[in-house]
Image: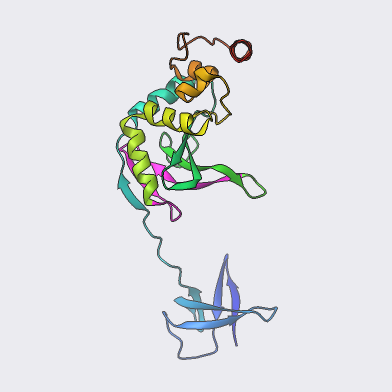
Amino acid sequence: MNTWKKQGDEWCVQVEDALARTGSQVTVTKRDGTTSQVTLGVRVISNIFKVARPAATQPSRAQVGEMTGLLALFDRAAEHLRNPAVVLGVPGMESTTLRITRAGQSAAQPGTLNVLDNVRIGRNGRRRWYGRVTRAGVFEMSPGAAPAMTERLQDLARDPVRVASEHGRLTGNCCFCNRSLEDERSTSVGYGPICAGHYGLPWGDRPAEFAASPEDDVQAFERMTR
């Protein structure tokens, strides 16, 4: 019977077959009697082998264009918000809404754009990760990403304000914070007055930078939505 055996910090396979070689596929039995199929890797000693690990696959890539326009919006909003974001629907994928954010300094690739699902799932409330857009404008896709997402990101790179605003107008939710838009001045542009101030965009007959502080934001929002 082939069994698991720990060698240092790594679990290896101890085999009975004296003819077993690297690359052989064997059945390994656990203590509870359950079994699993593994491929033998490098021989450690005698009849003990490491487990062969599949080679890491490179993510699929697609050129979507540099996101300088979107990053400029995020730079402006970063004066007010910790994590600026754009919420974006995907044509042909009615149940999917993307959330685009900028990776922080502690991320694996700071300054790149994370492409996430807007809906949180699981007990820990994490968002599904579809990949990242590099500073060179390349979409590095996770296995769960769909081709339609690439096309949508290409649209966003060409004209971020128009594309984001279009989502807000079509859904009735702000393209930045995803809150419901109730004022007709908000639904006409796809975002609300507070987000307009944060992202430096025009709204109604007011200048883009009307909000000076979080307190002013709340008061302004209350006045404009009465």
Residue at the bottom extreme?
A: 18
- Residue 206 is situated, as x and y percent measured from the top left of the image, at 48, 8
Query: Can you say which quadrant of the picture contains the C terminus?
Result: top right
Verify whether residue 81 appears in magenta: no
Name the residue at 43% across, 27% down: 165
Q: Which residue is more in the foreground, 110 or 9?
A: 110
- Residue 77 is situated, as x and y percent measured from the top left of the image, at 48, 21
- Residue 114 is situated, as x and y percent measured from the top left of the image, at 45, 40
Q: Is residue 110 above or below residue 3?
A: above
Q: Which residue is more in the foreground, 196 or 1?
A: 196
Q: Which residue is more in the foreground, 151 or 143?
A: 151
Q: Is residue 121 above or below residue 175?
A: below
Magenta residues (range) = 126-146
Q: Is residue 70 above or below residue 122?
A: above
- Is residue 165 found left or right of 217 in the rendered image? left
Query: Can you say which quadrant of the picture contains the N terminus?
Result: bottom right
- Residue 80 is situated, as x and y percent measured from the top left of the image, at 53, 19
Residue at the front extreme?
A: 184
